[in-house]
């Protein structure tokens, strides 16, 4: 029986699927534009074998629903619009820091962004529990590096480096929120000229995000995959997004469903409150139905299905997107 996202996230990390062939990215198509994040081995590499694994939970080959694990060489997968307008979004799929929901929170999001003229970059980032030194920093290392690689290649990608957003989901929302609040934190040693670029996104969208690592509201699987099951109180505080809001935090866009039983809506509420207290900008949309992990798949009659249009409108008002 195919495991549900709820079952896997509820249990933390799980081993899924079959290994990909040697050197294969497994989930990418032959024509995909793939950009490596690091010129050599990523920070924290131990030299241990990490094997790519992909599970497709869809029964319709035309609409895959792949979960990706075993990421030893993180990349950006570029999806370009037919009529680019210069805006770009780095997409950060979720999966409890135990897998990446590559289609639901990656390729499907890229499609609606492309339809609005926005270039999309799907971040295939490393998973902290797969065998890395300083595991708590590994996803943020890749997210910071991803923003810098995109900015440094702005001319090549046909984008404006001052109109670059991040959009993250679930645990990917925690990573996007961490990038928005910790973009200036030195989490790795610079490796080339790209690292002279800013890692600050101009806008951050967080959809049903894990925010706080406080035991009362956190998603335990995400917390334990990121920090380990015996993290100190100091480590939990350091990695809680709502505790890291500063005067340099970009505008935030928050989406959550009140009936989310996996990541409580309180996560978005505490972050919105922190942003307001810091005098920063944020817009939040809460829907009474939708659950968790809906991506862009809610039926049109569901109020929450409007969130992509709302996010785009917010980005237009903030000068990142174009009407």
Image: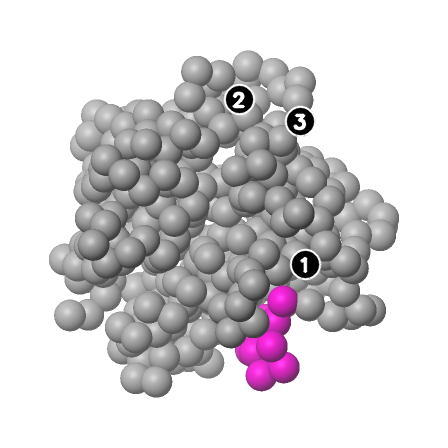
Q: Residue 28 falls in which quadrant of the image?
A: bottom right
Q: Earlier in the sequence, mark 3 or mark 2?
A: 3
**Residue at figure coordinates x 33%, y 68% from the top left:** 113
In the image shown, does 193 or 109 lie closer to the viewer? 109
Instruction: Compare residues 303 and 214 and report the one nearer the observer.
Output: 303
- Residue at 82% x, 69% y is 22
**In contact (CB < 8 Å): disc 3 and disc 1:** no
Prevailing secondary structure of the magenta residues: loop
Residue 270 among those drawn in magenta: no
Question: Marks 2 and 1, how far apart in space?
Answer: 30 Å
> Residue 258 location, x and y as percent?
28, 32
Residue beneath label 2, please?
236
Q: Are marks 3 and 2 in contact (CB under 8 Å)?
A: no
**Residue 3 visible (yes or no):** yes
Q: Secondary structure at mark 3?
A: loop
- Which disc number belongs to residue 228? 3
The quadrant of the image that shows the C terminus is bottom left
**Residue 224 found in image quarter:** top right
Earlier-in-chain disc, 3 versus 1: 1
**Is 41 positioned to the left or the right of 204 in the image?**
right
Q: CA distance from mark 3 to mark 1?
A: 24 Å
- Residue depicted at 62% across the width and 33% down the height: 12
Tell me if mark 3 has few (under 14), some (14-19) or many (20+) residues whose alpha carbon lies within 10 angstroms of its own.
some
Q: Residues within 10 Å of mark 1 (few under 14, many from 20)?
A: many
Q: Position of residue 168 (x, y in %)?
A: 42, 49
Q: Residues within 10 Å of mark 2 (few under 14, many from 20)?
A: some
Residue that badge 1 annotates: 54
Judging depth in this view, the residue of 72 and 68 nearest the camera is 68
Q: Secondary structure at mark 1?
A: strand
**Residue 246 left/right relative to 19:** left
Q: Is residue 40 above or below residue 245?
A: below
Looking at the rendering, the stretch of residues picked out in magenta corresponds to 27-35
């Amino acid at each position: 029986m195919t495991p549900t996202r709820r079952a896997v996230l509820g249990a933390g990390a799980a081993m899924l699927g079959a290994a990909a062939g040697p050197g294969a990215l497994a989930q990418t198509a032959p024509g995909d534009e793939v950009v490596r994040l690091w010129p050599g081995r990523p920070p924290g590499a131990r030299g241990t074998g990490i094997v790519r694994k992909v599970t497709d939970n869809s029964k319709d080959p035309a609409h895959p629903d792949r979960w990706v694990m075993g990421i030893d060489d993180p990349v950006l997968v570029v999806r370009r619009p037919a009529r680019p307008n210069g805006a770009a979004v780095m997409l950060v799929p979720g999966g409890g820091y135990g897998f990446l929901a590559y289609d639901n929170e990656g390729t499907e999001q890229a499609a609606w962004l492309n339809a609005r003229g926005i270039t999309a970059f799907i971040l295939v980032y490393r998973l902290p529990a797969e065998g890395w030194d300083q595991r708590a920093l590994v996803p943020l290392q890749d997210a910071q590096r991803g923003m810098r690689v995109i900015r440094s290649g702005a001319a090549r990608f046909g984008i404006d480096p001052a109109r670059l957003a991040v959009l993250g989901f679930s645990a990917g929302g925690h990573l996007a929120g961490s990038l928005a609040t910790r973009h200036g934190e030195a989490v790795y040693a610079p490796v080339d000229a790209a690292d002279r670029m800013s890692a600050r996104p101009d806008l951050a969208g967080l959809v049903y995000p894990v925010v706080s690592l406080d035991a009362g509201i956190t998603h335990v699987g995400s917390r334990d995959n990121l920090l380990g099951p015996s993290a100190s109180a100091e480590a939990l505080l350091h990695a809680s997004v709502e505790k890291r809001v500063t005067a340099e935090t970009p505008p935030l866009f928050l989406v959550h469903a009140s009936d989310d039983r996996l990541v409580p809506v309180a996560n978005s509420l505490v972050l919105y409150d922190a942003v307001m207290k810091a005098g920063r900008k944020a817009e939040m949309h809460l829907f009474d139905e939708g659950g968790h992990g809906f991506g862009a798949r809610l039926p049109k009659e569901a109020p929450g299905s409007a969130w992509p249009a709302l996010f785009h409108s917010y980005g237009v008002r903030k000068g990142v997107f174009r009407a």
